[in-house]
Structure formats: structure tokens, C-alpha cells
Image: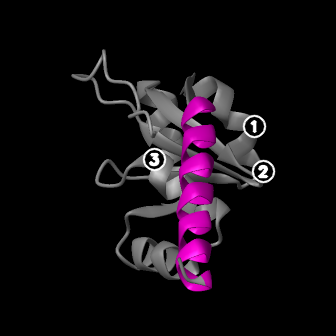
Amino acid sequence: MSEKDMSDSDDTAQEADLSESLNGETAIIAWSELVRHFARGVVIHVTAELDLVETAASVAADDTSAVQVWLDNGLMRRASDYDARDWAEREPDFWCVVTAPWVLVQEKSQDATDYTPRVVH
């Protein structure tokens, strides 16, 4: 096995470990528990089109090219005052994972009451 192959293999293992760790730290949280993080400006809204754990792993790994594409396409963005008013009114639950200093959230679907984030092996 070449040095490059070994390095690629190590990178893949580290990415899997990071995703697995983040998956284990993902939790359901209510808007009332997010308010203080919103006030600090660290809540990042991730749309349902993205996998929350994979997105958090990319943020943690400083994958700027992937994150920039998602930002440019509106798939992730800092939560706005409009979001806060909407969430305060509706009081939805969120899937949440912390990738310091950011708190990434994805609104929990009403029809997916038994959904759990996928487990990465």
C-alpha cells in the first residue's frame, strides 16, 4: 500500500469517527432551549435537504468548499430574527448537534415522530 493510500485510509477512518461521534451527540431540543444560543448568534439552520450529521462533520472538519456551496444555495444559514419569531410561535422541536462554536439545528418533521439520525459505522 502506498503512502498516499494509507493517508487516504486514515482520513476516511477519521471522518467516520467524527461522524459517529457527532451522531452520538445529536439530540432533540425545544426552541425554548435554543433561545440563549440564538441570542449569542451561533444557531445555524440546516434545511431538510442536508443530513445534519454530515453537515456538522463538514463544519467540524473545516470543509470550506462544501460549506460554501450549502451557504450559497441556502441549504444552511445563520438563524434569522424571522426564524426566531416563527419558532417562538410554533414551538417546534429540533434535531441539534454542537460543532463549537456553532449549534446546528434542523427542524424535526411533524410526520417523522419515530425518525432517528442514521448511525454511521
- In the rendered view, would you say 116 is above or below 106? above
Report if the CB atoms under discs 2 and 1 are less than 8 Å apart.
Answer: yes
Q: Which residue is mark 3?
A: 52
Q: Which residue is mark 1?
A: 36
Could you give the CA–CA distance between mark 1 and mark 3, rounded to whole angstroms?
21 Å
Q: Which residue is mark 2?
A: 40
For residue 116: magenta?
no
Q: Residues within 10 Å of mark 3 (few under 14, many from 20)?
A: many
Depth check, mark 2 against mark 3: the one in front is 3
Answer yes or no: is residue 80 visible. Answer: no
Residue lying at 67% horizontally and 26% vertically, measured from the top left:
33
Residue lying at 74% horizontally and 46% vertically, measured from the top left:
39
Q: Residues within 10 Å of mark 1 (few under 14, many from 20)?
A: few
For residue 4: magenta?
yes
Query: Of residues 57 and 32, which is closer to you in this image?
Result: 57
Q: Amino acid at mark 1?
A: Arg
Q: Amino acid at mark 2?
A: Arg
User: Secondary structure beneath disc 2?
Assistant: loop
Q: Splitting the image into 4 quarters, where does residue 111 fall?
A: top left
Q: Position of residue 21 (x, y in %)?
A: 63, 39
Query: Of residues 91 and 49, which is closer to you in this image?
Result: 49
Image-based side of 100 in relation to 47, left or right: right
The main secondary structure of the magenta stretch is helix
Answer yes or no: is residue 2 visible. Answer: yes
Depth check, mark 1 against mark 3: the one in front is 3
Tell me where the magenta segment starts and ends, as one range: 3-25
Q: Position of residue 14 (x, y in %)?
A: 63, 57
- In the rendered view, would you say 39 is above or below 64? above
User: Secondary structure beneath disc 3?
Assistant: helix
Q: Position of residue 95 (x, y in %)?
A: 49, 33
- In the rendered view, would you say 46 is above or below 77? above
